[in-house]
Amino acid sequence: MTNPLLEPWTGPFQLPPFPAIRDEDFGPAFEAGLAEARRNIAKIAGSAEAPTFANTIEALELAEEVLDRVSGVFYNLAGADSTPAREALQRELAPKMAAFSSEVTMNADLFARIDTLWQGQDTLTLTDEQRRVLELYRRMFVRAGAALDEAGRKRMAEVKELLAVLSTQFSQNLLADERDWFLPLEKADLEGLPGFVVTAARSAAAERGREGHVLTLSRSLIVPFLQFSSRRDLRETAWRAWVARGANGGETDNRALAAEILKLREERAKLLGYDSFAAYKLETEMAKTPGAVRDLLMRVWEPARAKAEADGAVLTGMMQGDGVNGPLEPWDWRYYSEKRRLAEHDLDEAELKPYFGLDAMIQAAFDTAHRLFGLDFKPLDLTLYHPDARAWEVTRDGRHMAVFIGDYFARGSKRSGAWCSSFRGQRKLGGDRRPVVVNVCNFAKPAAGEPALLSWDDARTLFHEFGHALHAMLSDVTYGFIAGTSVARDFVELPSQLYEHWLEVPQVLDRHARHAATGAPMPADLRDRLIAAATYDQGFATVEYIASALVDLAFHEGAAPADPMAVQAGVLEKIGMPAAIPMRHATPHFAHVFSGDGYSSGYYSYMWSEVMDADAFDAFREAGDAFDPATAKRLEEAILSAGGSREADTLYRAFRGRMPGVEPLLRGRGLVDAG
């Protein structure tokens, strides 16, 4: 039988032939892709010709075509629709792919060619983009260990393989804990829950082949349960299960894995001559140093904690008014905060939710992109990797720009959270290749025949991930190495967080926030109350986030801790963490930090980007129009289409003319007076 992953993809937009792909196709396809890549790398490294940008850098850009194509399919499916076979292959591939990466980046002959180009770049006729790509390739090789001696390169390769194995295991342990836990709910256990939560619990039971209702650890179900359930005992049970993910003992416990990962990261940094992994990781980010990260986080921490403590006192009073004595607990906060929001802002989640239908919010995101950037979205009738996934062709003035895939509902085979990824990235080298971009979310799936309704936070998540998608879809560079979201980690969240602002624009809500049953627009007074409450409970949200970011920094700033949980406890005690607010991500389920190196020593980056996104949206306010064409064009040209073609601060200055201070962020979170 032929392998569909290795055959030419001749279907619409050269998408992967999902219906034809079987799990058993992936292993042979990876072997073929690795073999081809090794042949191509050997040819480049062993060439008798003097190195040129074309025969070295551009050849490297195209050397792993088959491997990239297969990886794009497999890793997207492994995250969004896991199976036992895919999990087993993921474990098998982790050390193999890490070893291959080390083979390439520590190939002495290949590095010598790149270094020769780098040293002689002033004698070459290079475009600005080519200079940038050359700089980044050399930097990648050096930071991977290419300049180490033979013993150092050997140990670095071993460390990377071990890290790949441990990170994969961390992810799979977390998925197993999230997939396996559920709490059956009897009729009496549904007390206080609005209809949309009851419906979601019934759907969760049906997915597990059970009658009645169950509570799962899907964020889109457990958070509203904690908001609305009048059963304090069940809220405690649910909350404890949620925060215990990865720390339940047995085979899926992640605490020892976290310690081993941190130890290996420290060794990796020391091999390269850095004092700590944080120093190594932050060198190429906008922040540059751990000190700069800590300074930003602590400037926001103090007003955030003060706000959270004041809010906690109010919620404690409400709880005591209900006859519940003792301190406010973490499983009480969301419940009483929801009651307070109703009392102070006359906002009821059950009243709001019908105005945020999933399809309506998708159209709101599309319409906003059309008004800002002239993009059009046409539904595609395609069979994708899961029945819940759907696709659109993205065009501008009739020109094909991208294929966008949305996969929005939670399921047991999908890891938690929300993310943006690509099956194929953009580039012009070797022909104009347009991207295939996917947004993956975990919204509660409705019962058959009922509309999918989002919370306000869900709608923000949808806009956030679509901002990432725009960064990928509007990319307009020659080299895939710097395309789309291939930017500094503390810059990559700028487009996504900036896009969230348009959800609060009155014209967007007036046009798209319509009642799922009646089609009536959201009443103006409800819309105004919603916008007025946009900063509600930001003390809680900011405190839970910054605590996680500070713990991440502490893990990587000095010697690797033998007991990460003790470090976590020490950090929380030192900063005076309010007892009723948990970290957003405790160590055993901190996937951002331990399921790969992406956000390790970099969880702060959401806030670093938020400093810019708050200021960036001010540019539209200053223009007097949230859809100002000139400002939108400048945003696209300076940031969204530019990828990593220049340093992040240079890109931002090209858009805004300067770098921002922290004040717009504090105002945006309601932590200082708006005046």
Image (cartoon, helix red, strand yellow):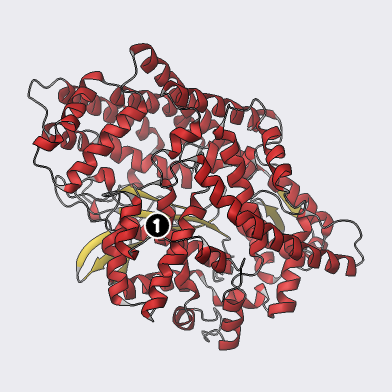
**Horizontal and vertical percent for residue 225?**
71, 61
Residue 136 image-quadrant placement: top left
In the rendered view of the protein, which quadrant contains the C terminus?
A: bottom right
Judged left or right of residue 322, residue 151 is left
Read off the residue under disc 1. 468
**Horizontal and vertical percent for residue 156?**
41, 20
Judged left or right of residue 165, residue 648 is left
**Horizontal and vertical percent for residue 428?**
17, 50
**Horizontal and vertical percent for residue 603?**
52, 46
Q: Residue furthest top?
A: 151
Crowd rating for badge 1 (residues with CA inside 10 Å; few <14, some 14–19, many 20+): many
Judging depth in this view, the residue of 255 and 77 nearest the camera is: 255
Residue 342 image-quadrant placement: bottom right
Residue at the spot 70% in from the left edge and 63% down from the top edge: 307
Q: Is residue 195 above or below residue 178?
A: below
Three-letter code for the amino acid on which mark 1 is drawn = His
Residue 474 image-quadrant placement: bottom left
Judging depth in this view, the residue of 540 and 306 nearest the camera is: 306
Residue at the spot 52% in from the left edge and 67% down from the top edge: 459
Number of numbered tags placed on the structure image: 1
Judging depth in this view, the residue of 465 and 362 nearest the camera is: 465
In the rendered view of the protein, which quadrant contains the N terminus?
A: top left
Q: Is residue 626 visible?
A: no
Q: Secondary structure at mark 1?
A: helix
Q: Is residue 125 visible?
A: yes
Judged left or right of residue 438, residue 592 is right
